[in-house]
Amino acid sequence: MTYQFRKYSAISILQKQFMLWSRTMPTFGMNQDIFISQSRKAPLTTLSNIHKTSSFTEFLPPDPLIPSPDVSKIAPEFLLRQARVLDDGFYSYIRPEKREEYKFILHSPSALQDLGLLPNEASTEFFQDIISGKKHLDKPYPYAQAYAGFQFGTWAGQLGDGRVINLFEATNPQTEKRYEIQIKGGGLTPFSRFADGKAVLRSSIREFLGSEAANALGIPTSRALAITALPKTIARREKFESCAIVTRMAESWVRLGTFDLARRQNRGKNLRLLADFVIDKVFGGQDKLVNPQEAVIISGDENEATRNSKYVRLYREIVRRNAFMLARCQTYGLLNGVLNTDNTSVLGLSIDYGPFAFMDTFDPSYTPNHDDGHLRYSYRNIYDSMWWNLVKLGEDLGLLLGAGTHLDDPNFQDKEGYLNEEYAQSVQEQAVSVISAAEKEYKDVYQDTINKGFQKRLGLLTLKLTDESEIFNPLLEIMAEGGLDFNQTFRSLGDISLFSEEDLNESDILDELKEFYPSKKGAFVLISVEDSSKKLLEWLHTYRRRLKEEGNTDDSLRKKHMDLVNPKFILRNWILQEVIDRMEKNTDDKILSDVLHMALNPFQESWGRNPVDEMRFTGEVPSSLRDGVCTCSS
């Protein structure tokens, strides 16, 4: 489907916002292994022995009210957890709240392995106590992050970890990849605002399974290490619900919203500190950022030092990574549902699995969020919404993007941190130029990534410039018009024999194509199955010619390639809800393990667990449960 990308003008937006800096108003190489040097063989380890650090608290300033772990240890509970807005600092030292009972449920073997822990480590008492928040370490000491953000396009002010407690960073001894470990549902923090610091079992199951399913599909994402029930802890949502802890990990939890906060704190004095931290400690140094000469022309300032400054490269790196992540999500129909700036990672990870969903029916207007009435985060609009977020980041970084070599000039800013007027215009023009150039990079990376994704999903060996307009978009249009299932259609196309005869046997093929359609037509599908399948047959002729053109005429080999990238199992909303229902009734704890196993191995034909569930979960979506939506309640 050809989408018209709306152009958010960096020039007009930044001109409106740039007064923030005046006196009048206070290699993107797709390398996911950010912290890997030359891999060296080292033994797997235990959680107690793994190397632990806390670079976020080591290099960035704390909440002035709780400036150290020692103060946190002696501070009364009401002060530790009292809601407050930070005029300075990025975090507050705080320990998890004690719960009456902890019941370890399950860990992800995939996440455990990526962390570098022994396969049996999850069964140890130390592991279960630490990852549930039942106990915590003194070194490093736990903390909650502060950040801010725009929610649904509106400034929401300071937000932060309202129920998340960050425990420590752990470095895999084999890959040297570093993860920040945190628990969600760990209790009240200074950033809880009006909430209770709890996470219900329902939302914890969704995040635990959702992030691991995304990772198995090759989507850059945060991970879920484990889930722990809190049987005697109850939260009031639409009803009273039992609570849980989900243990998450990511290479970094810094968000665009962290820069939103820094820009507005203390007249932006912490902004450069945060940017340097992200460059040096999150990305691992300037040499890990996008090559300054790669695929971008920044007009305006001819000063090479300005164009290629580390802050310009940082911005471009973040833009490119998020374009890549979004395209991977779109390739498999994963929608976050609430992709605000506080839910957008500087590393280009899919984070914060709230009202998310993998699409059932391909519908460009579909959003999984019940509260997204304007479809801001729908499949059709998410590209523009992500770019809007990235423009906001450009505004946050505007001073650093436009300053170039002037940044260290003693006359560049006055003693109070305000930008001197003589530099204002040139800084603004350069920042606008950087953001405008980054918009083209954003589009190019997104289009290249999603086209390569669809190329592989259709079993094409090569990618032509015309494939988007002649192959990919026409197929998506047929799916949308006919109410076809997005992921099942790709999987089923691999089963059709296109070269068993000299030409297509249209009668037989039409019978096969009718099996692509749900037995009960969706309410908004106006075309008949017969008419839609004829259009799909016409498309198959074009697809067949394209395959033949590249010598790709072995049906069995094509199917083999397609089955490696087209999952048989997709973690759909209705499956998640069934898992939740069966877990909440306490009748079937095994269902969570079974579905996790399927989510971690989505391309298999079978999983050797419950054959009845496996058949249902990979079959047609029940018509009454198709295209479900969620609220943000969690």
Image (spheres, rainbow, N blue to C red):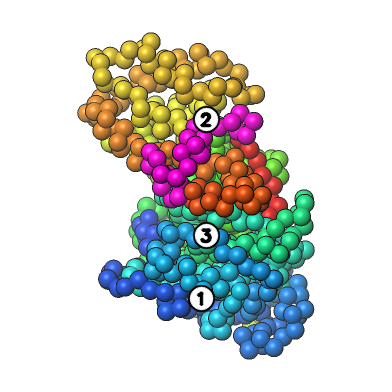
Q: Earlier in the sequence, mark 1 or mark 3?
A: 3
Specify the quadrant of the image occupied by residue 428.
Answer: bottom right
| Most foreground residue, 610 or 214 | 610
Tag 2, which secondary structure? loop
Kindly report the distance in space between the C-alpha atoms of the residues bearing marks 2 and 3: 28 Å
Tag 3, which secondary structure? strand
Specify the quadrant of the image occupied by residue 573.
Answer: top right
Residue 616 colored magenta? yes
Q: Which residues are magenta?
A: 597-626
Which residue appears at 73% of the width and 61% of the height?
A: 234
Residue 106: which disc?
3
* 620 sits to left or right of 375: left
| Most foreground residue, 374 or 263 | 374
Residue 114 image offset from top left, x and y in percent: 40, 63
Q: Which residue is mark 1?
A: 126
Above or below, 226 against 480 in this view is below
Residue 210 image offset from top left, x and y in percent: 53, 51
